[in-house]
Image (tube, rainbow, N blue to C red):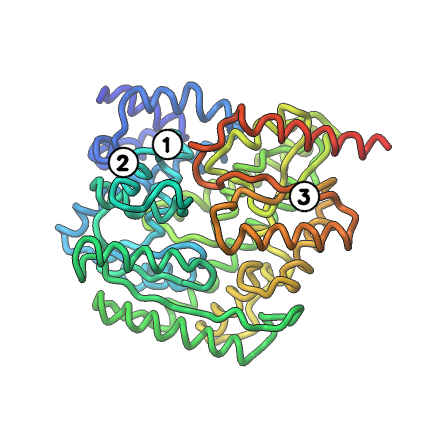
């Protein structure tokens, strides 16, 4: 690998000279581990990123840089294990609080990340090159035709290709996703008992239609106990004690980051012309949801930078699409397939917020409880995917109205037994109650082997035409 190309790439992602010098040894180590080439770096900075993201912003460049840091750190986990560092993974959906508390307690002695997510993002979001991971998982038995989640495939394929080490333990919050915990069991059964140690926490979805999950004290208490039991089991496995002060700092940090994410969403949705594309906006909002081992402080710096740049662009009347362009909300903007957002913008319509990662007023408020596990449980139950459908619908309606969108796009999860049907039902109910048009797109949030730009272009163009015609009436 040409070192000059590596330096050029890091500078493109807003690394300072000092940061490049510090980061370069790990970067050079990770490049072959991740299966990257000089051509991949060139493609990323010359074509993929400038075509699909708003790279004129330093905040967006720092966002990409933070993602790269985390992906490189995942590729380094084999070396970490040799050094005696304990490896702790988690999976989606979850929030970062308990995981970052483990990092607070263990410092450099523990690696904590959602490894499959950040590996997929680093490969796909930056280089459009996650397919080898997915294909490896399919070779190992995660059959292509069954439409398994690409995150679970990345976990298997990344491990089997040597892109990440087996963890000392993976903590799976099986609160929504049933295949995530099953994947960990699958790895153990396929490659040997104890190969992939895992702890599973569960939460039954048994609240009644419209009940406010985050205001039900008995439910918060149940979840708090589930999280506490899971964390104690993790502590015993890795030999690191998580004290109350570690949890308290994690709760406060998560709350601060949620406020910043909410502020950025409000800024983007109020701007006219819109100052930032939806794929980057949604990725920025992971700041309060996902733990990172190496990238979190850089990620938060990226959000801070983007807030400053967004306010400046809004004041100057500069945007990424023409003024008064129609705006669409989305259940979850597919940031791993960023050309979808680009095609919408090419047709004069801007995608904006994602309901799943848009903090509402409750999520931006301080927790009601001082006890950190109760506060964490309440944080989770304030998240849309922690709630019963009617309560989540009420939140989605509030977000759609307050952000003044002209329509909503659902979909991108047809592979998911939960979200596939869930979104279709939500779309029907919300459109009936609000009159806001809803559209559903069959496609995949994480990868685009079955959904090329040509395949979805006609569908996106049709949605854009319908939105424009409605506004002209």
Q: Which mark is residue 408?
A: 3
Q: Which residue is mark 1?
A: 15
Q: Quadrant of the C terminus?
A: top right
Badges 1 and 2: C-beta atoms under 8 Å apart? Answer: yes
Q: Is residue 189 left or right of residue 379?
A: left
Label 3 sits on a secondary structure element that is strand
Q: Is residue 22 above or below residue 5?
A: below
Which residue: 41% across, 47% down?
149
Label 1 sits on a secondary structure element that is loop
Q: Is residue 260 above or below residue 23?
A: below
Q: Which mark is residue 23?
A: 2
Quarter assignment of residue 206: bottom right
Please tell me which of labels 1 and 3 falls first in the chain. Answer: 1
Please tell me which of labels 1 and 2 falls first in the chain. Answer: 1
Q: Is residue 97 above or below residue 460?
A: below
Q: Nearer the viewer, residue 78 or 458?
A: 458
- Mark yes or no: residue 297 visible: no
x%, y% of residue 158?
27, 42
Please tell me which of labels 3 and 2 falls first in the chain. Answer: 2
């Amino acid at each position: 690998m040409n070192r000059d190309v590596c330096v050029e790439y890091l500078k493109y992602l807003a690394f300072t000279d000092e940061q490049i010098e510090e980061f370069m040894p790990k970067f050079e180590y990770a490049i072959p581990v991740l299966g990257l080439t000089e051509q991949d770096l060139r493609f990323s900075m010359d074509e993929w990123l400038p075509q699909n993201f708003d790279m004129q912003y330093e905040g967006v460049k720092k966002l990409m840089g933070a993602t790269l840091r985390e992906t490189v750190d995942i590729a380094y986990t084999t070396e970490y294990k040799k050094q005696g560092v304990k490896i702790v993974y988690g999976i989606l959906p979850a929030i970062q609080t308990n995981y970052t508390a483990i990092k607070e307690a263990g410092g450099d002695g523990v690696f904590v990340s959602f490894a499959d997510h950040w590996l997929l993002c680093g490969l796909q979001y930056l280089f459009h090159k996650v397919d080898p991971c997915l294909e490896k998982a399919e070779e190992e038995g995660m059959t292509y035709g069954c439409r398994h989640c690409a995150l679970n495939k990345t976990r298997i394929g990344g491990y089997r290709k040597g892109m990440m080490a087996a963890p000392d333990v993976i903590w799976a919050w099986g609160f929504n996703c049933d295949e995530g915990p099953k994947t960990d069991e699958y790895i153990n059964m396929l490659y040997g008992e104890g190969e992939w140690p895992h702890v599973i926490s569960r939460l039954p979805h048994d609240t009644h239609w419209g009940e406010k999950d985050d205001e039900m004290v008995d439910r918060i208490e149940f979840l708090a106990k589930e999280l506490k039991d899971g964390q104690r089991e993790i502590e015993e496995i890795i030999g690191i004690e998580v004290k109350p002060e570690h949890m308290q700092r994690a709760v406060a940090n998560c709350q601060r980051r949620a406020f910043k994410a909410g502020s950025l969403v409000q800024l983007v949705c109020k701007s006219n012309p819109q100052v930032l594309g939806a794929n980057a906006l949604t990725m920025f909002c992971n700041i309060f949801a996902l733990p990172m081992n190496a990238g979190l402080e850089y990620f938060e710096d990226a959000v801070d930078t983007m807030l400053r740049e967004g306010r400046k662009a809004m004041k100057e009347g500069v945007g990424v699409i023409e003024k008064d362009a129609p705006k669409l909300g989305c259940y979850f903007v597919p940031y791993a397939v960023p050309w979808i957002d680009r095609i919408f913008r090419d047709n004069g319509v801007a995608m904006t917020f994602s309901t799943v990662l848009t903090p509402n007023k409750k999520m931006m408020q301080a927790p009601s409880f001082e006890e950190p596990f109760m506060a964490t449980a309440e944080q989770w139950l304030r998240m849309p995917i922690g709630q019963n459908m009617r309560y989540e619908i009420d939140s989605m309606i509030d977000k759609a109205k307050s952000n003044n969108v002209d329509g909503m796009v659902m979909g991108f999860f047809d592979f998911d037994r939960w979200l596939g049907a869930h979104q279709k039902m939500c779309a029907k109910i919300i459109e009936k109650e609000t009159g806001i048009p809803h559209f559903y797109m069959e496609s995949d949030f994480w990868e685009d082997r079955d959904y090329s730009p040509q395949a979805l272009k006609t569908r996106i163009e049709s949605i854009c035409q319908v939105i424009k015609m409605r506004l002209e009436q």
